[in-house]
Image (cartoon, rainbow, N blue to C red):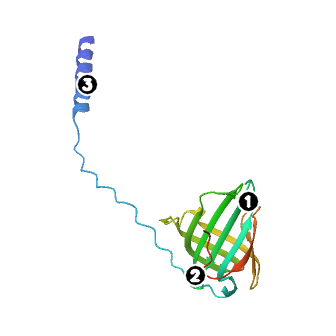
Amino acid sequence: MSSAFSRYAGVACAAFILAGCATRKDSPHPASQPAPPPKPVACAASSGADALAGTWYSVTTPRGVAGTQQTVMVLSPDGKMRYQTQLKIRNKSRPGLDETGCWSFANGVYTMQTTESNGDPVDPSDPIYTNRYKVESVNQATLVLREQKPGGEVLKARKMPPGYLLR
């Protein structure tokens, strides 16, 4: 019985080894398709937003920063926007930010959707490129916004002449 068992075990082992050497020819994997580009964001005018259209300039001291931040927002009536910031620490300018995209106004909230940052396209589905502000007040000379997030900072801006940009 021992010899029959050994023979059976040897044949079974040989079958397993041969089965391991046999390969199955798989069909070739199709090349992975690149993700489709994000849909372009279409800018459109917001009804009731005429008072927000224009060029707005503010200087703030962001929390945790030992300097000031200058900001210029250019809000066109057609829903397009340009947003520039310049940080100054001890009177030295740091690299700035220059974003373009779309803006809208609904239910007292100003929304800024960036489509390009410093000339490079961005993924509009990334939440970092969408900013919302509660419009606390607006008139012909001043605009007061509050960030729509816990502990949101207040931005007080004054209206500037068309064409005003940070240099």
Q: Amino acid at mark 1?
A: Pro
Q: Say which residue label 2 marks.
A: 79
Instruction: Tell me if label 3 and label 1 are in contact, CB under 8 Å.
Output: no
Q: Nearer the viewer, mark 2 or mark 3?
A: 2
Q: Position of residue 147 (x, y in %)?
A: 72, 67
Q: Amino acid at mark 3?
A: Ala
**Which image quarter is the C terminus in?**
bottom right
The part of the image, by quadrant, that contains residue 96 is bottom right
Q: Which mark is residue 62?
A: 1
Helix, strand or loop at label 3? It is helix
Circle nearer the N terminus (3, 1): 3
In the displayed structure, 54 sits above or below 5; it is: below
- CA gap, disc 2 to disc 1? 27 Å
Q: Residue at x 33, y 56 (%)?
A: 32
Q: Say which residue label 3 marks.
A: 12
Residue 6 lies left or right of residue 100; in this view the side is left
Q: Residue at x 61, y 71 (%)?
A: 83
How packed mark 2 is, by other alpha carbons closer than 10 Å (few <14, some 14-19, many 20 or more), is: some
Helix, strand or loop at label 1? It is loop
Q: Amino acid at mark 2?
A: Gly
In the displayed structure, 90 sits above or below 153; it is: above
How packed mark 3 is, by other alpha carbons closer than 10 Å (few <14, some 14-19, many 20 or more), is: few
Residue 30 lies left or right of residue 131; in this view the side is left
User: Which residue is nearer to you in this view: 115 or 64?
Assistant: 64
The part of the image, by quadrant, that contains residue 71 is bottom right
- CA gap, disc 3 to disc 1? 75 Å
Circle nearer the N terminus (2, 3): 3
Q: Position of residue 115 (x, y in %)?
A: 52, 70
